Image: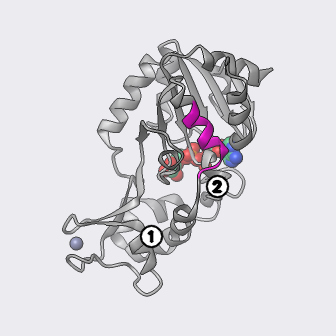
Amino acid sequence: MTVERAAELLSAAHSGLAMTGAGVSAESGIPTFRGEGGIWTRYDPVKVASIDAFLEDPAAYWRVSRERGGIALAARPNPGHYALASLEAAGLLVAIATQNTDGLHQDSGCRNVIELHGSSRTVRCLDCGAREARSDVQARLEVEMPPRCKACGGIFLKPTVVLFGEPMPLPAVQEAFALARAADVMLVVGTSLVVHPAADIPLAAVRSGARLIVVNAEPTSFDSLAEVVIHGRSGEVLPEIVSRLDA
Ligand code: APR
Ligand code: ZN
């Protein structure tokens, strides 16, 4: 009945907004950060994913990033991504704001994806600004650690993702908050909602009167604000919801 209720709310949406986190890509094989098996249970995020740590020792960053980066590059969208793309295609979602940097929402056909934490598919040299595809850099990590910039030979090649201690891309954040304040339905999928300001986006939506739907494998601190809470795997739950939309 909660799936039906979620389908009912989404069927009537005119300005729905989705916000996703690592959980929506878990069934594509990309480990989450927190919760069971999360990578922050093995590494200290500040030590390996902060801008200070990166500048101090880019090789240490790349040794950790090599593993997750390789998995993300090989990953394909799962049914949860495709379900969100069909909600957007049906005009029920106006955008998908994501904390993920894996590009799988775009791969699944979502057109308006707001990348709050950037994209791990591109790498940028902090010395000269040259950009390269992450897949090209990934290929030479076995023989070049840290990878060097092809243009200037610099060792500060950094994926275009937001590291701890870095600001989020302002245009993306502004767009996400503007859509949240205008949203009539806010669909939150696969995020522990512990990282701010991303976690403030659904809050802004609820404060502006949006109905909140949470789909997550584990309870979140937003469950009490939600009209519908479904604890489950997004790759199963989201297609279920889509299959029950008013035809
Ligand atoms: N379906 C739905 N939810 C899932 C699934 C699944 N198959 N698998 C895991 N989850 C849930 C987990 O229970 C967890 O609550 O997804 C959530 C993922 O939470 P995090 O790992 O904290 O990921 P996220 O919320 O996206 O992290 C936010 O933190 O480290 C930074 O920049 C990083 O963007 C990331 C940010
Ligand atoms: Zn360079």
Q: Residue at x 42, y 36 (%)?
A: 112
In the rendered view, would you say 123 is above or below 80?
Answer: below
Q: Is residue 5 left or right of residue 173?
A: right
The extreme bottom residue here reads 143
**Alpha carbons under labels 1 and 2: distance apart:** 23 Å
Q: Which residue is mark 1?
A: 61
82 or 40: which is nearer to us? 82
In the rendered view, would you say 88 is above or below 110?
Answer: above
Query: Which dot marks residue 28?
Result: 2
- Tell me the quarter of the picture where residue 21 sits: top right
Residue density around tag 1, few if under 14, some if 14–19, many if 20 or more, within 10 Å: many
Quadrant in which the N terminus is drawn: top right
Q: Where does residue 145 sit, x and y in percent of width and height?
A: 41, 82
Q: Secondary structure at mark 1?
A: helix
Q: Residue at x 72, y 29 (%)?
A: 243
Kind of residue indicated by mark 1:
Tyr
Determine if residue 191 is in view. Answer: no
Q: CB under 8 Å between callouts 1 and 2?
A: no
Q: Secondary structure at mark 2?
A: loop
Q: Earlier in the sequence, mark 1 or mark 2?
A: 2
Q: Residue at x 68, y 50 (%)?
A: 35
Magenta range is 77-86
In the rendered view, would you say 242 is above or below 185?
Answer: below
Determine if residue 193 is in view. Answer: yes
Q: Where does residue 213 sit, x and y in percent of width and height?
A: 64, 25
Name the main secondary structure of what is drawn in magenta: helix
Q: Is residue 231 magenta?
A: no
Q: Where does residue 93 sit, x and y in percent of width and height?
A: 51, 26
In the rendered view, would you say 116 is above or below 93?
Answer: below
Kind of residue indicated by mark 2:
Ser
Q: Residue at x 30, y 38 (%)?
A: 170
Q: Where does residue 190 sit, x and y in percent of width and height?
A: 63, 41
